[in-house]
Image (cartoon, rainbow, N blue to C red):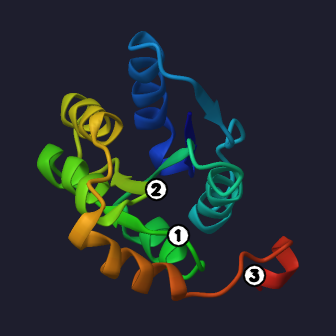
Amino acid sequence: MFILGSDRDGAHLKEIVKQDLLDHSFDVLDVTENTECDFVDAALAVIREVQRGEDRFGIIIDAYGAGPFMTACKIKGIIAAEVSDERSAYMTRSHNNAKIITLGAKITGPELAKNIVRGFANGSYDGGRHQIRVDMLNKMGRPLPDSKEENA
């Protein structure tokens, strides 16, 4: 299942990505139907849902991708990648076991975004020699805050 979220700047591209995933028979949950949220809130909403199961992956879209990436990387057990090409999206799943990617709507066009998401969706974790780094990454960060008040 793919969990999608965006702020106002990423809403249009999120809808394009969502429709493409649905067209390719992927299960999709949009946690930011209300696009008035900040990228931090969008990222935390996606992370909460991703952490509910091994078969859940997140895609967070704002203007440039950097903000949600920084937010996700602060949370223990989350491996995220800010991507702007198909190969990086595929490889971050393959080598880093990334659960989340972030995209920037002001730097990534619709066709490229769909290709990036397909690369991420079609990737799978290789394990093996990569597990040492994945274990290191999973130990970093802080627990997910329980509420918006904790984010302030």
Horizontal placement of 26 versus 46: left or right? left
User: Is residue 115 shown above or below 31?
Assistant: above
Indicate the position of residue 90 as horizontal and vertical percent values: 22, 47
Against 62, residue 29 (above or below) is above
Q: Which mark is residue 151?
A: 3
Q: Which residue is at the front of the view, 133 or 44?
A: 133
The answer to which of marks 2 and 1 sits earlier in the sequence is 1
| Residue 4 left/right relative to 106 | right
The residue positioned 46% from the left and 13% from the top of the image is 25
Q: CA distance from mark 2 to mark 1?
A: 7 Å
**Residue 134, picture quadrant:** bottom left
Mark 3 to mark 1: distance in Å? 17 Å
Residue linked to disc 1: 78
Q: Residue at x 16, y 43 (%)?
A: 86
- Classify 89 as above or below 67: above
Front position among marks 2 and 3: 2
Position above or below: 7 against 149:
above
Question: Image point 17% across, 55% down: which residue?
Answer: 88
Dot 3 or dot 1: first in sequence order is 1
User: Which of the two discs, 3 and 1, sits closer to the camera?
Assistant: 1
Q: Nearer the viewer, residue 116 or 40?
A: 116
The answer to whether 84 appears left or right of 120 in the picture is left
Tell me how many marks there are. Answer: 3
Judged from the image, the secondary structure of the residue bearing numbered disc 2 is loop
